[in-house]
Amino acid sequence: MNILFAETTQAHQQLLPLTYTRPIANLRVGILTLDEKWSRYLAPESFGYVTQEYLQTKFSSVSPANDTLWVIDGLIPSPDLITAAKSLQAGQALTVESKIILARGKTSPIDGPNSYTLKEFSGTVDQITYSWDIFRLNGQEIRKDYELITTGRKSAGVADPHTIVYGSENIFIEDGVTVKAAVLNAKNGPIYLGKNSEVQEGALIRGPFAMGDNSVVGMGTKLRGDTSAGPHCKLGGEISNCVFWGFSNKGHDGFLGNSVIGEWCNFGAGTNNSNLKNNYDPVRMWDFASGSFIQTGLQFCGLIMGDHSKTAIGALFNTGTTVGVAANIYGEGFPRTIIPSFAWGGASGFVTHNPRKAFITADIVKKRRNLALSQDDKDILNHIFETSAQYRVWEKNV
């Protein structure tokens, strides 16, 4: 069996700016990305993506066959779904409220739904439909991924005598991890520390929490739970219910709550966001699919930030702010709650961040990790620059 992760255009748009640079199936929630979760559960021979045309070169596909399992949009696997997926025969599709979520066969169920015999799924389904679903579901997904990753394995354990541990049975430490004079409290949820990661002196970590390989929790950091980070991240200050992709840094003091941060982002010292309105009303956020603000239904909702965006020292973000790709935010006060891709400025106004300069910065940052900005990356960023121009309203006045 192989797996093809397919997505509708509307679903992709609803998850911008995070999906500007990746397919929906490459979104991280919990410890793993969606494609990693499905692959660990089903161990396919191969998997690929049927995504937006400008992403397809970087995120390759595989040839569909009668035994191909199609996973549609941001579907999160569960034990019941995995059982149902394994029982699907060629030509059958699983639906929820008449919408196909899984199918087995050679034809894309998005392009050719009539090729399939439909079976309604009676269980509960979790799906990443909007960007805020990622932090909303992150705690439960850390718990599920923790079981998936650690069952039948032995933790390296905490050797440091000055580290205080609560709920050691819910803590898994990979090889090469360093923990010094920290507090790890896994009574309310598991804690997972990836290979060669580091927890520095005075850090306070409350589960559920997970971080990927080669990541660092800085001195005196307060992690309040339901937070996860990918590989090569730096975490500092106060963080609550957040998800970081790999290679992003919030290494200094400042609060970040109920937020999702893309790859290669960096927060200047003292950057803070609001995650609760003063009147406690539900938070609205920008929806790229409808081109308007919509209700999230959430009382706590902070910042969504696309890849390669940066903040200067003391930056502030209001409740329910969306920042696009390759934006630079600085200056006093709260900027608007929708900051387009390739924006440069803050509350006093924006100018356009020239793509050539963005490439130079991205390449410098990647080289610090012994990586390089590929031509595929440049092509994707150029596409984002062109398609996001409609949101850079200041350009219309030039």
Image (cartoon, rainbow, N blue to C red):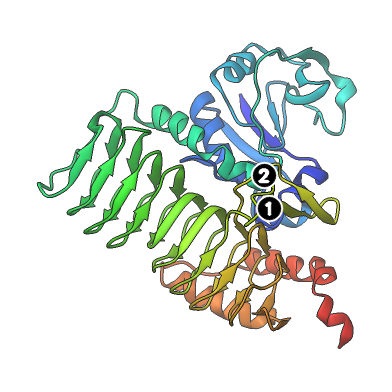
Relative to 153, say whether 362 is above or below: below
Q: Are marks 2 and 1 in contact (CB under 8 Å)?
A: yes
Location of residue 294 in the rendering, given as x and y in whole percent from the top left corner: 79, 49
Q: How many marks overall?
A: 2
Quadrant location, the N terminus: top right
Label number found at residue 24: 2
Vertical comparison of 253 with 95: above or below: below
Q: Check disc 2 and give the amino acid type.
A: Ile
Structural distance between the alpha carbons of marks 2 and 1: 6 Å
Q: Which residue is mark 1?
A: 19
Horizontal side of residue 366 vs 222, given as left or right? right
Q: Residue furthest front?
A: 279
Identified by mark 1, the residue type is Thr
Q: Residue at 28% of width from left, 28% of height from top?
A: 153
Position of 344 relative to 18 (above/below):
below
Q: Position of residue 147 (x, y in %)?
A: 40, 27
Q: State the SS at label 2.
A: helix
Crowd band around label 1 with a 10 angstrom C-alpha radius: few (<14), some (14–19), many (20+)? many
- For the point 81% across and 66% down, which residue is it? 387
Question: Is residue 309 toward the left or the right of residue 351 in the image?
Answer: left
Q: Secondary structure at mark 1?
A: helix
